[in-house]
Image (cartoon, rainbow, N blue to C red):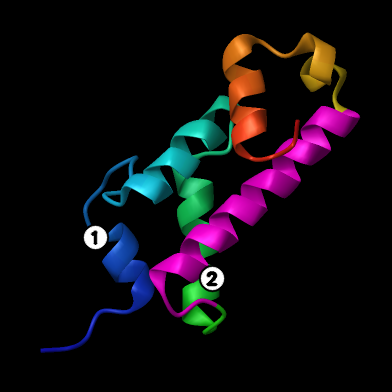
Amino acid sequence: MEKLNLYDELVGSNDTTSFDDKELEDINWHANIFDITYVELTKVLKEKSDDGTITNQEEAKNLLFDFCKKKVLNMVQNDSDFAEGNLEDDEAFAASFFEVL
């Protein structure tokens, strides 16, 4: 039996919009509030697992968290709709999750 790579272990081959892992799904849930999609997150995972950048689940979590944090920070700093004073409660909660606020 062929060993699955990390991407296959984390995402699998089923069509879905959520991760089985609670911590990855927390990242996904908060990211969606800022229109960062599951598909976008899985593309990042696929690219980095294929090139060997990530080799375990903890690295995958850190990768996705940092990816989202950079995107959310950019939105908060550069998009007036997402400026700190203009955030809805769920957006502020998600921004705090990614340690942007």
Residue 100 picture location, percent across and down = 74, 37
User: Can you see residue 46?
Assistant: no
Q: Which residue is depicted at the point 45% across and 80% down?
A: 55
- Name the residue tied to disc 2: 47
Residue 21 picture location, percent across and down = 30, 52
Say above or below: 29 vs 54.
above
Q: Which residue is depicted at the point 72% across and 43% down?
A: 71
Spatial CA span between label 2 and label 1: 16 Å
Q: Amino acid at mark 1?
A: Ser
Quarter of the image with the C terminus in it: top right
- Circle 1 residues within 10 Å: few <14, some 14–19, many ≥20: few
In the image, 35: left or right of 73? left
Question: Which span is picked out in magenta?
Answer: 54-78
In the image, 12: left or right of 87? left
Residue 58 in magenta stretch: yes
Tell me whether circle 2 and circle 1 mark residues in contact (CB < 8 Å). Answer: no
Q: Nearer the viewer, residue 43 or 97?
A: 97
Name the N-terminal-most of marks 2 and 1: 1
Say above or below: 99 vs 42.
above
Overall secondary structure of the magenta stretch? helix
Q: Nearer the viewer, residue 51 or 19?
A: 19
Residue 62 picture location, percent across and down = 56, 61
Task: Identify the image quadrant of residue 2.
Answer: bottom left
Task: Identify the image quadrant of residue 76.
Answer: top right
**What is the number of the mark on residue 13?**
1
Circle 2: element type: helix
Residue 61 in magenta stretch: yes
Quarter of the image with the N terminus in it: bottom left
In the image, 24: left or right of 93? left
